[in-house]
Image (tube, rainbow, N blue to C red):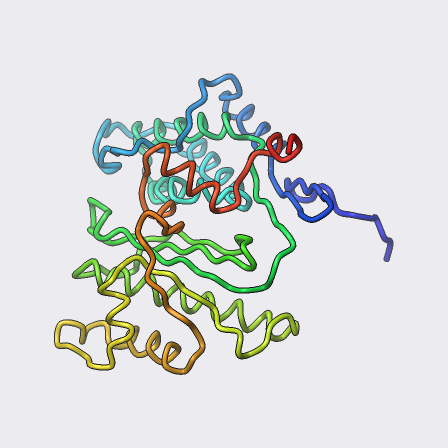
């Protein structure tokens, strides 16, 4: 084997090493993607989606003729989300229409490219901090206009550094916002415990180091802490048993957080410009130029 020194570029990822932190982005990849789809000179915008979004299942119902082009664009955007969690929700929406994209879906994708054009040098910042695990869980109840399924999302931080995130439509329909939040909480709990298991095998943390999960839904928080199964929650009994088992067993710590402070909110719905920028910063997504000037 040959030692090639510090890694600086691999599979489109650019890695910059500083004294106390590491910055990872896909600036060159983003520029090449914009050039490929002829959007390198497009007018920049500050958010990937409009806050008041039209129903993505309605609009110009004419089919987009070049399905291969649309699929290629969405595939390229999926790869870009490796270092850009702020794109995850919008890319998740677009990926649902790969089979039969319409004209308005193509317009949504081009708007997203305009946002990418304005933020090509953005990426994830990793600092040397403690190894505490903190997860944020959130959902958007019945947000899909076609099948009324909810969106689950989580962001998981290790010592303040984002290491795992998800924006995904739930497999089944939730009958209440509490149920939707509880399903998202279950997904977050499984991911947090998986990360904790890996860190324990690597001898990075101890078994009694409790991961913290923050949820902004009071009902879901109360349901996880309530040992009594109410009739209205029988249909989510399996998930209830799982979360409560981990909570009672001392494997996780559950905390309520205000909706405005729930970072995972960025991955469930379009936000206002100010809220989007604040949550994007909280995720650790910053500009390379800002990092070099500081």
Please give the name of the residue rendered at 45% of the width and 31% of the height, measured from the top-left corner.
69
Depth order, front residue of 149/177: 177
Question: Is 15 situated above or below 199?
Answer: above
| Quadrant including the N terminus | bottom right
Q: Position of residue 146 (x, y in %)?
A: 20, 46
Q: Position of residue 243 (x, y in %)?
A: 34, 74
Depth order, front residue of 60/116: 116
Q: Position of residue 100 (x, y in %)?
A: 32, 38
Question: Is 57 situated above or below 261?
Answer: above
Q: Residue furthest left?
A: 231
Report which quarter residue 239 is drawn in: bottom left
Please give the name of the residue rendered at 64% of the width and 34% of the height, measured from the top-left corner.
294
Left of 106 or right of it: where is 142?
A: left
Left of 9 or right of it: where is 48?
A: left
Please give the name of the residue rendered at 24% of the width and 62% of the height, measured from the top-left corner.
218
Exactly how many numbered labels are in the figure? 0
Q: Residue furthest right?
A: 2
């Amino acid at each position: 084997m040959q030692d090639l020194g510090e890694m600086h570029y691999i599979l489109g990822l650019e890695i910059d090493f500083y004294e106390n932190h590491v910055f990872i982005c896909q600036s060159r990849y983003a520029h090449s993607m914009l050039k490929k789809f002829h959007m390198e000179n497009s007018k920049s915008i500050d958010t990937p989606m409009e806050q008041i979004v039209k129903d993505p299942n309605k609009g110009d119902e004419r089919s987009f003729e070049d399905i291969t082009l649309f699929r290629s664009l969405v595939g390229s955007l999926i790869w870009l989300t490796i270092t850009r969690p702020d794109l995850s929700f919008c890319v998740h929406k677009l990926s649902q229409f790969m089979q039969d994209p319409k004209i308005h879906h193509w317009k949504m994708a081009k708007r997203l490219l305009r946002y990418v054009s304005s933020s090509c040098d953005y990426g994830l910042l990793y600092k040397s901090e403690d190894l505490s695990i903190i997860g944020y869980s959130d959902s958007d109840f019945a947000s899909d206009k076609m099948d009324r399924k909810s969106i689950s999302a989580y962001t998981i931080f290790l010592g303040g550094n984002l290491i795992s995130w998800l924006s995904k439509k739930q497999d089944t329909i939730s009958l209440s916002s509490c149920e939707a939040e509880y399903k998202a909480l279950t997904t977050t709990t499984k991911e947090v415990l998986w990360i904790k298991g890996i860190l324990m095998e690597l001898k990075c943390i101890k078994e009694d180091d409790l991961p913290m999960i923050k949820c902004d839904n009071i009902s879901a928080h109360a349901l996880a802490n309530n040992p009594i199964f109410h009739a209205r929650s029988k249909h989510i009994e399996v998930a209830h048993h799982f979360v409560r088992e981990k909570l009672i067993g001392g494997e996780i710590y559950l905390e309520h957080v205000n909706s405005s402070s729930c970072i995972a909110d960025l991955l469930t719905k379009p936000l206002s410009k100010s809220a989007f920028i604040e949550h994007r910063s909280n995720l650790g997504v910053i500009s390379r130029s800002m990092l070099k000037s500081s």
